[in-house]
């Protein structure tokens, strides 16, 4: 890659990628009554954490819920807790302290985890819909098709696929060059 310098007869080879030290998050500037958004976001975050933790605890403790369907429900609650925890603290920081800067590395890390858990939520909903499809279309063979082993395999494949997709996307983003 080459670019023109101040002298039009000279070119320099640039092999480095330009990375900014930080990004400026401009989407939340000049929003009136920002403190109310902070209170609402805190409330929703706490309700999400408490509710999903309660669901996971009930599924873990109640032996009658140790069926293949509830493996996916447990995983859905887990990814919701992780996804909320990946996204909400930076939003709370922006709303409470008006810090609109995010470092390059923190941005990529947040991007990775937010998209990983969002993908996993979509994949978990797909797994749950597959479970219901088999239950409706093949009710007599449901317990032979949907087993603990098959549900763990589906969930594991979904995690591996989501990590691969998001890692690949973040890897290609790190190859981008940003201007000033």
Image: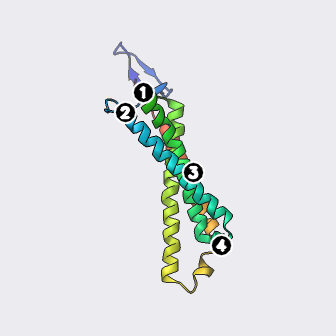
Decide: is 51 above or below 167: below
What separation in Å lies between label 2 and label 1 (alpha carbons)? 9 Å
What separation in Å lies between label 3 and label 2 (alpha carbons)? 34 Å
Q: Report which residue position mark 1 lands on.
A: 98
Position of the C terminus by quadrant: top left
Give the residue at x 49% y 28%.
17
Question: Which numbered disc, 3 or 2, marks the residue that appears first in the sequence?
Answer: 2
What separation in Å lies between label 2 and label 4 (alpha carbons)? 45 Å
What separation in Å lies between label 3 and label 1 (alpha carbons)? 32 Å
Q: Are marks 3 and 4 in contact (CB under 8 Å)?
A: no
Decide: is 60 above or below 37: below
Question: Which numbered disc, 2 or 1, marks the residue that appears first in the sequence?
Answer: 2
Which is in the foreground here, disc 3 or disc 1? 1
Residue 108 visible, this angle: yes
Decide: is 162 above or below 112: below
The 10 Å Cα crowd at callout 3, few under 14, some 14 to 19, many 20 or more, is some
């Amino acid at each position: 890659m080459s670019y023109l310098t101040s002298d039009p007869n000279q070119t320099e080879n640039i092999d480095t990628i330009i990375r900014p030290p930080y990004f400026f998050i401009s989407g939340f500037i000049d929003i009136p009554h920002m403190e109310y958004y902070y209170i609402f976001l805190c409330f929703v975050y706490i309700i999400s954490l408490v509710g999903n933790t309660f669901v996971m605890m009930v599924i873990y403790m109640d032996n009658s819920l140790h069926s293949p369907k509830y493996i996916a429900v447990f995983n859905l609650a887990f990814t919701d807790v992780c996804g909320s925890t990946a996204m909400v603290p930076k939003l709370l920081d922006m709303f409470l302290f008006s810090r609109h800067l995010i470092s390059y590395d923190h941005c990529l890390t947040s991007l990775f985890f937010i998209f990983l858990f969002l993908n996993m939520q979509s994949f978990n909903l797909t797994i749950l819909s597959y479970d219901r499809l088999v239950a409706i279309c093949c009710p007599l063979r449901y317990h032979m098709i949907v087993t603990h082993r098959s549900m763990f395999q589906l969930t594991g494949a979904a995690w591996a696929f989501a990590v691969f997709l998001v890692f690949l996307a973040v890897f290609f983003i790190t190859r981008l060059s940003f201007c000033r």
